[in-house]
Amino acid sequence: MSPSLVQGARGQRGLLRQIREVMADGSSAQARLDRVVEIIARSMIAEVCSIYLRRTSEELELFATEGLNREAVHNTRLRLSEGLVGEVARSGQPLNLNDAPSHPSFAYRPETGEDPYNSFLGVPLLRGGRTIGVLVVQNMAMRTYGEDEVEDLQIIAMVLAEMVAGDLVSDDELKDIEIAPQRPERLKGSSFADGIAIGTVILHEVPVTPDHLLSDDAIAEEARLLTAIGDLRDQIDQMFEGQHGLAGPTFDVLETYRMFAHDRGWTRNLVEAVRSGLTAEAAVERVRNEQRAKLNNARDAYMRERLHDLEDLGNRLLRVLAGRNTVAREIPDNAILVARDLGPADLLEYDRKKLKGILLEEGSAANHAAIVARALQIPCVGRLERLRDKVNQGDQVVVDGETGEAYLRPRPDILGAAVARMDMRAARRAEFEKLKDVDAVTRDGHRVALLMNAGLEFDLEIMHETGAEGIGLFRTEFQFMVSEDLPRLKRQTELYERVMDAAGDKPVIFRTLDLGGDKILPYMETEREENPALGWRAIRMGLDRPALLRMQVRALLTAAKGRELRIMFPMVASVDEFRQARELVDIECQWARRRGRPLPQVLRVGVMIECPSLLFHLDALLPMVDFASVGTNDLTQYLFAADRTNPRMSDRYDVLSPPMLRALSTIQKAAEDSGTPVSVCGEIAGKPLEAFVLIALGFNRLSMPPAGIGQVKRMILSLDREQASKAIRKLMGSSYGSLRSEVLALARKLNVNL
Ligand code: PEP
Ligand code: MG
């Protein structure tokens, strides 16, 4: 092993102190940088030491050098990823070479006079995980720098980065150094919750910029760090035992936390950083910076996930060091929350009135944050790659939940367009507001019941605002998905009771748990499945684990307190499944009766039609059920064999197509013939063009996301159903794969308000 360039921690502390003194000496930025490279070169016994900084033009410019030609300073510029220096900047990783000129990325710049130097060690200047420059040492001898030397240079780079970003950046000479992203940027992700918002970025994972980088007493600092690590380990153990109110981490993540928190490598890196003269906070920041840089480059999603967890752990340690164990956060009005992902209760920590939008680096439309965001009507866009690397706390951003985009530091024209669209949406809302108490009746006198899909308590406030006639689909699994642990009988009963109380005389259809598939509970052990959408989910799980289903039915019966109750089963694929599920309800009713508990005045038990198999057994199914509801989201998925969670599939097949319309028509006719009330509760019910077709096919009950009600009602008021019906039936005989343009042309011809 080679000796440390700075001869151990004490030597390095001395060096860091010298750098600090130079940086604080009040001379010009250039003079200070010149002195710093000289000091580093001397202490590290390097023939060359150079600092490259990143310009706003994205180029890396040689800013100071000891050993290379002085004329090259401010003249040598490299693109990111050009040359060895560019490679270090791009990867965010050190590059350690004994024979630099033979490296494939080597870019020879004659003006620098670097010919005689063979060995090269470059480390990134990182700030908040971003590369703001590169620090290089070079020697003539062909040698590989030791691990200690690499670490030493990284610590120096960290101190230097903070100083450049802190003290020096105000200097005129450094004014267009890119310390933080500044340019406008547009990121494309996926929409998790509709709506548009403009606001100020609040980072969920608070970046703790170390106030004091260098400690005065390394021994005391080490003790402080070790105490904090001990506290952190205790905290994780408590989370495991479920005693802690902290929300979020799943079992897997906790396992990873625990593994890392007890990992000797992690602790050693932190301790070494402290021994070299850094404060505990700076040590965490340093280790975290390295991880972030690695993370941005890891190809393997699993690895990236683990590194993310490690970064979160660093955040927790910083909080422990700061004596903050919880994050009751003050946020500005118009806050846009930026996070990697959010756990079940994370979102609820923020003031709802001030939180105007959410941007996530990851997540999916089915996860907690997205569900809560939709219920709270907060626009949310997710799957924005490297988002946190591209925004700064306090940046202005536009969240476009209509298109699934985010505009960072938008230009005035983008901002203007966003404001105009927000105004338009507000105007439409005002228009729909006026229709709130108007019945949805077609021009030829057919009444359509418009209901709302819901799943959380917040939804009920909206019900009264939209004028929905009731809740056509209450997704009971949402309570489970936004909860930290399994909601048992009491909590379920309380929620259902509050929902029924809030709905008053309006009907509510409670759908039993539809878990599995893309709706996974962190706290419930399930096996990983090859094909979750086709796997052990919804009623299949309920029938195999009757205790869970019975608990839910019991909660519903108790909550009804003798009132009318509607229960519906999801994902039924065979009549036997419905029969068995209904039997469980009967058993629960008998149980309640034996105990003298009040039974619902009227109990209706219905089925969701989502599996195509039922289409061929409607004659047996419909007489058994009190009502049916078509779940077109899943019916489309299974009819076309196209995963609804796969973005590549989302626009591939059209519901407005002969196969789907024939399937829907078959269901509607069979229901009508057997006198079974039927509704449609998939997302299409809330889209005016699709709803136009559903009504033409004869459906007269639609349940939809609340935002759809106003626009669908407006459409209905302009519609002549008989005319539409005839024309749609004709179109269904078509040989086209999609009828969208024909349907659109028809709606226009019939003067339907879309
Ligand atoms: C559906 O599948 O259409 C439906 C309404 O249920 P979910 O979207 O909850 O699966
Ligand atoms: Mg479904």
Image: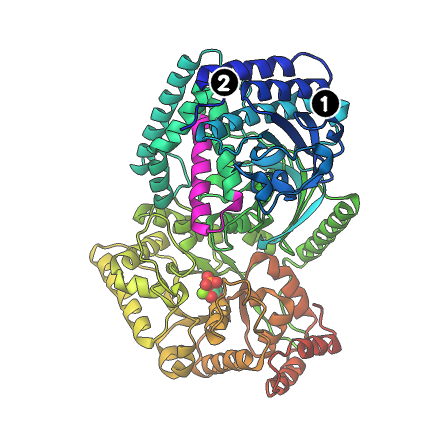
Q: Residue at (52%, 49%) from the top-left corner? A: 362
Q: Is residue 154 visible?
A: yes
Residue nearer the viewer, 733 or 685: 733
Left-right relation of 385 to 560: right
How many neighbours does mark 2 have within 10 angstroms: few (below 14), some (14-19), or many (20 or more)?
many
**Is residue 316 covered in magenta?**
yes
Q: Is residue 480 above or below residue 247?
A: below
Image point (75%, 48%), residue name: 414
Direction left: furthest residue: 594
Residue located 50% across and 24% down the image: 282
Give the alpha-carbon distance from disc 1 to disc 2, as whole Å: 27 Å
Image location of residue 440, percent across then percent down: 62, 67
Q: Which numbered disc, 1 or 2, marks the residue closer to the eye?
A: 2
* Amino acid bearing label 1: Ser
Q: Which callout, 1 or 2, points at the residue further toward the start of the chain?
A: 2
Q: Which residue is mark 2?
A: 12
Q: Is residue 323 visible?
A: no
Q: Check disc 1: other Cα within 10 Å, few if <14, some if 14-19, many if 20+.
A: few
355 above or below 136?
Answer: below
Position of residue 421 relative to residue 734, above or below, is above
Q: Is residue 156 left or right of residue 78?
A: left
